[in-house]
Image (tube, helix red, strand yellow):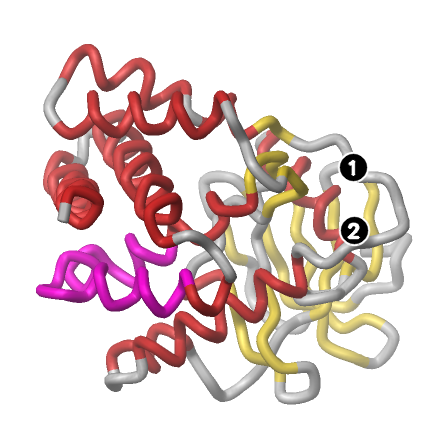
Amino acid sequence: MRRWGLTPDGGPIHTPSSDLLPVRFAGGPAMLKVARVEEEKVGHRLMVWLGGEGAARALRHDGAALLLERVEGDLSLTEMVQGGEDDEASRVLCGVVRELHAARPQPWPELTPLTRWFRSLEAAAPAHGGPLTLALETARQLLARPQDVRPLHGDLHHGNVLHSRERGWLAIDPKGLIGERGFEYANIFCNPDLEIATGPGRLARQAQIVSEAAGLERPRLLRWILAYAGLSAAWWLEDGRTGEAQSALEVARIAAAELSA
């Protein structure tokens, strides 16, 4: 706070992975974020590398500490979906990804390989079988032959893209991965919540919207959705939250059915 000339501008926020504090910096609103886990520190490196293109600007960075532009707007992607604008929300997310994935002259930062993220699925599939086994097989095939590898946000969904009155839609809270760009879109299909995600016809419609907006082959996108939904279920199982795990597995089943159609 002293070194960067910050003054508090709200109460502290604590999450399992970070401590945050709204602050004022150089006369404007900002957010100080201090990581408590390595994953968040990696995400900080990606935010700095992105340079504010498609993402909140990194104003200062030192190890676990990151000072970010505070994004304050009047629109919400989750509220758009709830208000019947699911298609438009998906197109907004694809537009943000397009900015995040734009070529940059600076070398890629040191990020987490996408393959490492699937360790939870590798552990869960033998124990639980069923759709997790298919999700793991699909993930292994995709990871063995990646296409269009690049830095990835890694947790791109409706809650991690905020609206700025001045700069439009901006991503926050990346995980910082290196992998195939198709993976970036998979989390859209498990959000904004699992009830919406498993609604009749929702996945099929949004798969068409996203494949067109992102320039992706629909079958490969569906395979990434299947793999990611299995991974999400594995994470829920690790946390002992079987209800959420079953909902994520339903997303995996729907994706598998679309692939077979």
Q: Quadrant of the N terminus?
A: bottom right
- Residue 216, placed above or below residue 78: above
Q: Which residues are magenta?
A: 188-211
Residue at 22% across / 60% down in the picture?
A: 203
Query: Would residue 210 appear left or right of 260 to someone viewing this image?
Result: right
Residue at 11% across / 39% down in the picture?
A: 246
Between discs 2 and 1, the one toward the N terminus: 2
Closer to the camera in the image, 145 or 178: 145
- Residue 218, placed above or below residue 25: above
CB within 8 Å, label 2 to label 1 = yes
Residue that carries the numbered disc 1 in the rendered image: 109
- Residue 131, placed above or below residue 80: above
Closer to the camera in the image, 101 or 158: 101
**Is 195 inside the magenta-drawn segment?**
yes
Which secondary structure class fits the magenta region best?
helix
Q: Amino acid at mark 2?
A: Val
Which mark identifies residue 48? Answer: 2
Q: Residues within 10 Å of mark 2 (few under 14, many from 20)?
A: some
Q: Position of residue 130 (x, y in %)?
A: 10, 24
Q: Secondary structure at mark 2?
A: helix
Q: Name which quarter of the figure residue 172 lies in.
A: bottom right
Q: How far is disc 2 from disc 1 in space, using C-alphas? A: 9 Å
**Is 26 inside the magenta-drawn segment?**
no
Q: Secondary structure at mark 1?
A: loop
Q: Position of residue 225 (x, y in %)?
A: 32, 45
Q: Amino acid at mark 1?
A: Pro
Closer to the camera in the image, 41 or 184: 184
Q: Residues within 10 Å of mark 1 (few under 14, many from 20)?
A: some
